């Protein structure tokens, strides 16, 4: 059964349809493999075996009754631990929420459970999704399955490890400034941040509401597309969610779309397409292996008929300060609800209400979360609001207009760049220097600020055999188009990056 661990959704469904395996066997295989190996990688904060087995039994019942297979029937799924699953803990990797049990399912969770998936566990993350290496988790040290001395990337590190190690076929992460794409790139899997509004955020613990999006990860683009086809759509509980299929001219992200994707050749997808290479991202500051991989991708895209042109963006150089001002400001407001009264931990020695608030927050939050709250509160305070928060919003608008110009005036179909200027760094290498850590997000943040869809696809290994990730971006709401480009790029990769040594040793 071990060979199941590196199968795609399609492969598992073939075996199920041919009655060669049962859903319960799939569940047990993945759960046992995770139990045996996750003491090395720490991908999970909590395993949910009972839930996975219950869901698998229900799939087996449906099959026995002759019902058609659901789109994600018997597919092991890991959920970042800032997504609510009714009756199970949601800790956000924070001491604050150590004993918090979710009252309801997040909308995406509900949808993926209804599509037949099996929830194997809640995945590790940087506390409240703030970080780029997963080292801000208050729970355990997550490690990269390609090399256990290296970080898996963050903040959705556990979700990326789960896919890369064969603990799950699909994982969900959340992406505020790159937290799906960065760990996907460090762990050699595919990770997508959909356009803002395509996926409901209801039931995701909010970090920065104007930037947060939930998105899927998997070892293959087609599985990411399949997951997205089951999770998108308008939700009455999230007023920013949209029904993209109602907007004329946009691909509908349906199951049919995913099936049609598989029939396509890279040439079909790429011929005559105009792709922008964001030149600054492979200049000074980018590792040479990352630069070479990007240029190699350009060569292969061109060989399939795409036209690649270098572009540079005037406002891209401001993305870090703009992002850290806006995200921290929103975080300071969103995290005000953690006051020791409504949720989670409550300080024991408080003398009055004010000291209850401050002591609970002092004890419950880790240093990075406190840093963001202080930065955000400062940026929003009277006298500084105009100089910092408002100014950041204005630059955000200029950046958005610049991307619009590229897509709608200059008619680029997609943009290409690395996901990160470097590959996975060593544990502890950047923890003493928050600014250095923040630089990891330089290529991923623009998509969040501009609400664009973006995806990281593995593209070869560096000299230490750590994965390199390339990023593609498309115009807002063109998520289907983006997936087609990603599918083509994956086909052109050839190096078969998708099997980590940990997974390879197990099958
Ligand atoms: N690394 C970024 C941060 O710490 C992004 C986090 C995210 O996308 N959740 O803010």
Image (cartoon, helix red, strand yellow):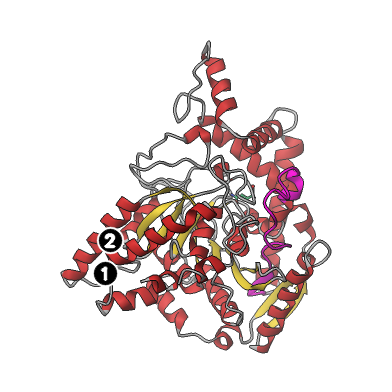
Question: Residue 22, labelled with which disc?
Answer: 1
Residue behind label 1 places its C-beta within 8 angstroms of ligand 1: no
Q: Is residue 117 above or below residue 82?
A: below
> Residue 413, located in which quarter of the rendered image?
bottom right
**Main SS of residues in magenta:** loop
Which residue is tagged 2?
56
User: At x 38% / y 76%, what residue is drawn?
Assistant: 10
Q: Earlier in the sequence, mark 1 or mark 2?
A: 1
Q: Is residue 424 on the magenta stretch?
A: yes
SS at badge 1:
loop
Looking at the rendering, in which quadrant would you find the C terminus? bottom left
Q: Is residue 396 above or below residue 362?
A: below
> Residue 11, located in which quarter of the rendered image?
bottom left
Q: Magenta segment range?
A: 412-438
Q: Are the residues at dot 1 and dot 2 in contact (C-beta closer than 8 Å)?
A: yes
Q: Neighbour class for label 2 at 10 Å: few (<14), some, many (≥20)?
A: many
């Amino acid at each position: 059964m071990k060979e199941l661990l590196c199968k795609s959704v399609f492969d598992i469904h073939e075996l199920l349809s041919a009655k060669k395996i049962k859903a319960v066997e799939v569940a047990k295989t993945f759960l046992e493999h995770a139990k045996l190996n996750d003491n090395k990688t720490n991908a999970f904060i909590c395993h949910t075996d009972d839930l996975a087995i219950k869901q698998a039994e229900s799939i087996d019942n449906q099959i026995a009754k002759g019902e058609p297979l659901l789109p994600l029937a018997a597919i092991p799924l890991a959920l970042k631990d800032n997504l609510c699953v009714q009756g199970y803990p949601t800790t956000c990797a924070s001491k604050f929420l150590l004993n918090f049990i979710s009252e309801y399912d997040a909308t995406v969770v509900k949808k993926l459970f209804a599509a037949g998936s099996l929830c194997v566990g809640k995945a590790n993350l940087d506390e409240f999704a703030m970080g780029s290496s997963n080292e801000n988790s208050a729970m355990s040290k997550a490690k990269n399955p390609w090399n256990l001395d290296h970080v898996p990337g963050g903040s959705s590190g556990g979700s990326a490890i789960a896919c890369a190690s064969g603990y799950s076929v699909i994982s969900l992460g959340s992406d505020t400034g790159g937290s799906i794409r960065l760990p996907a790139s460090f762990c050699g899997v595919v990770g997508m941040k959909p356009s803002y509004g395509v996926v409901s955020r209801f039931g995701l613990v909010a970090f920065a509401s104007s930037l947060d999006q939930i998105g899927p990860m998997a070892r293959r683009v087609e599985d990411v597309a399949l997951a997205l086809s089951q999770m998108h759509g308008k939700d009455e509980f999230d007023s920013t969610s949209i029904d993209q299929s109602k907007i004329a001219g946009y691909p509908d992200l349906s199951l049919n779309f995913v099936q049609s994707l598989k029939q396509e050749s890279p040439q079909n997808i790429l011929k005559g397409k105009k792709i922008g290479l964001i030149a600054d991202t492979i200049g000074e500051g980018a590792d040479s292996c990352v630069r070479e991989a990007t240029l190699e991708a350009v060569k292969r895209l061109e060989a399939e008929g795409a036209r690649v042109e270098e572009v540079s963006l005037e406002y891209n150089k401001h993305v870090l300060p703009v992002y850290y001002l806006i995200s921290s400001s929103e975080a300071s407001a969103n995290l005000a609800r953690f006051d020791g009264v409504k949720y989670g931990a409550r300080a024991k020695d408080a003398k009055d209400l004010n000291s209850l608030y401050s002591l609970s927050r002092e004890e419950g939050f880790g240093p990075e979360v406190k840093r963001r709250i202080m930065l955000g509160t400062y940026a929003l305070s009277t006298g500084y609001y105009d100089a910092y928060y408002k100014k950041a919003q204005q630059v955000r608008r200029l950046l958005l207009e610049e991307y619009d110009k590229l897509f709608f005036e200059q008619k680029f179909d997609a943009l290409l760049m690395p996901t990160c200027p470097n590959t996975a760094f060593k544990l502890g290498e950047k923890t003493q220097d928050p600014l250095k850590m923040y630089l990891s997000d330089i290529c991923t943040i623009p998509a969040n600020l501009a609400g664009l869809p973006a995806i990281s696809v593995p593209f070869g290994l560096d000299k230490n055999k750590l994965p390199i990730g390339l990023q593609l971006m498309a115009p807002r709401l063109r998520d289907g188009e983006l997936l087609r480009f990603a599918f083509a790029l994956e086909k052109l990769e050839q190096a078969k990056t998708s099997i980590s040594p940990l997974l390879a040793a197990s099958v």
